[in-house]
Image (cartoon, rainbow, N blue to C red):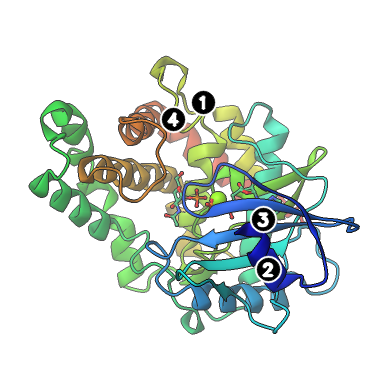
């Protein structure tokens, strides 16, 4: 099967290997090697339950290439490889949607930051992405998933999941639900700022998990997984990135004593990120960066929880309670962050006031 798909993109090459690759939760990803070719490729079957308009995301990818791959850039994005007939996607006989991109050679991804330079580099990479995209008009891009980071939408999904209790799992998780419920009000202000146009709508990545940065040796080499890139605010990227870049453990660590918010990683990431974006920030935007890691960790926490209640229909899971474990990690991370709020504000302020450091 994979052989036939690869032929659509490379009709004159013989496949030597196509193996499952990476730890993404959404698409099916394969690393493809061809006989006689030095370059590898990434083949992905796009999850069309999640991405209802796969052509839209491929078109966005092509548009982003024009900006982000222009001239000499310090960070790369993967290049979209067209089919032999010049199409951005291939749809197989069963309706499966396939995309090929270039493989970022000699690179690796990580799931947990173990050294501060990794956080600094991730901040630099996502900050570069935001600054470089700041020339684009967000209103000309579509959200690939509607209301993706809108808190009220995610709370609505959680409430539906509680009401429907489709997998019969509600009884055992009352305390977790109470934890999230008790924090929903204090996080609602960012959505208000967006709705009232008080902070700029920009083209942002929208999925800045640490394993969506590729490293080469001790440098960030590429930003990948552009499927959600589109309208959004900087807080989404900054906050979601810190959720993993400043977490001391895997997103699905079962031993919660290992899960903490690491302030050294937080500071390193913040310096890298602000060094890139400070020149584009509006005054209003500067104010609430400290809330972003809370908001985004919260949003992921309730999304995992809703999926758990719904019977694991969205994220890939490896065992029955996987989504609950992920949600408990987000909960612990929020608790840990809560002890650091004031120093977070200070570190952000200092990073914004320091001289810019890009590229
Ligand atoms: P998902 O949407 O499922 O997260 P990703 O696009 O993030 O899919 O790909 C999953 C993983 O595959 C990444 O975390 C990374 O390890 C690897 N990967 C994806 N694209 C590339 C690429 N162009 N070069 C090298 N590795 C890649
Ligand atoms: C998904 O695609 P991936 O694995 O990088 C999800 C993100 C979540 C993340 C949690 C399109 O990211 O929003 O933060 O899992 N992407 C989508 O690990 O839902
Ligand atoms: Mg990914």
Give the structural element (helix, strand or loop) at label 3: strand
Give the structural element (helix, strand or loop) at label 2: helix
User: Label 2, label 4: how many angstroms apart (C-alpha)?
Assistant: 32 Å
- Mark 4 or mark 1, whichever is nearer to me: 4
- For label 2, the crowd category at 10 Å Cα-Cα, with few meaning under 14, some 14 to 19 and many 20 or more, is some
Q: Which residue is mark 2?
A: 132
Give the structural element (helix, strand or loop) at label 1: loop
Q: Which residue is mark 4?
A: 252
User: Label 3, label 2: how many angstroms apart (C-alpha)?
Assistant: 12 Å
Q: Which residue is mark 3?
A: 223
Q: Quadrant of the C terminus?
A: bottom right
Cβ atoms at labels 4 and 1 below 8 Å apart: no
Q: Is residue 303 left or right of residue 77?
A: left
Dot 2 or dot 4, earlier in sequence: 2
Q: How many marks?
A: 4
- For label 4, the crowd category at 10 Å Cα-Cα, with few meaning under 14, some 14 to 19 and many 20 or more, is some
Q: Which residue is mark 1?
A: 249
Residue 104: x and y in percent read: 77, 54
């Amino acid at each position: 099967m994979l052989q036939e798909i690869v032929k659509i993109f490379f009709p004159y090459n013989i496949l030597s290997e196509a193996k499952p690759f990476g730890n993404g939760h959404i698409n099916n990803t394969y690393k493809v090697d061809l006989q006689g070719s030095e370059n590898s490729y990434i083949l992905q079957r796009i999850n069309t339950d999640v991405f209802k308009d796969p052509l839209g995301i491929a078109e966005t990818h092509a548009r982003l290439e024009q900006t982000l791959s222009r001239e000499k850039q310090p960070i790369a994005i993967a290049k979209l490889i067209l089919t032999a007939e010049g199409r951005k996607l291939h749809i197989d006989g069963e309706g499966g949607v396939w995309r090929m991109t270039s493989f970022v050679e000699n690179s690796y991804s990580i799931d947990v930051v173990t050294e501060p330079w990794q956080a600094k580099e991730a901040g630099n990479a996502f900050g570069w992405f935001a600054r470089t995209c700041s020339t684009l008009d967000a209103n000309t891009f579509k959200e690939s998933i509607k209301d993706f980071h809108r808190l009220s939408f995610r709370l609505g999904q959680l409430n539906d999941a509680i009401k429907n209790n489709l997998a019969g799992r509600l009884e055992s998780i009352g305390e977790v639900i109470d934890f999230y419920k008790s924090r929903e009000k204090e996080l609602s202000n960012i959505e208000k700022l967006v709705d009232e146009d008080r902070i700029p709508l920009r083209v942002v990545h929208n999925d800045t998990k640490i394993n969506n940065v590729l490293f080469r040796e001790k440098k960030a080499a590429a930003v990948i997984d552009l499927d959600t890139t589109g309208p959004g605010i900087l807080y989404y990227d900054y906050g979601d990135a810190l959720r993993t870049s400043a977490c001391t453990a895997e997103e699905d660590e079962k031993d919660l004593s290992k899960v903490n918010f690491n302030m050294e990683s937080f500071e390193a990431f913040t310096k890298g990120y602000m060094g890139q974006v400070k020149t584009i920030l509006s005054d209003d935007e500067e104010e609430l960066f400290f809330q972003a890691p809370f908001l985004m960790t919260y949003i992921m926490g309730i999304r995992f929880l809703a999926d758990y209640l719904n019977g694991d229909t969205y994220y890939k899971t490896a065992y029955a309670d996987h989504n609950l474990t992920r949600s408990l990690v987000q909960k612990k991370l929020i608790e840990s962050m809560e002890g650091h709020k004031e120093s977070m504000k200070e570190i952000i302020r200092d990073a914004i006031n320091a001289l810019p450091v890009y590229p």
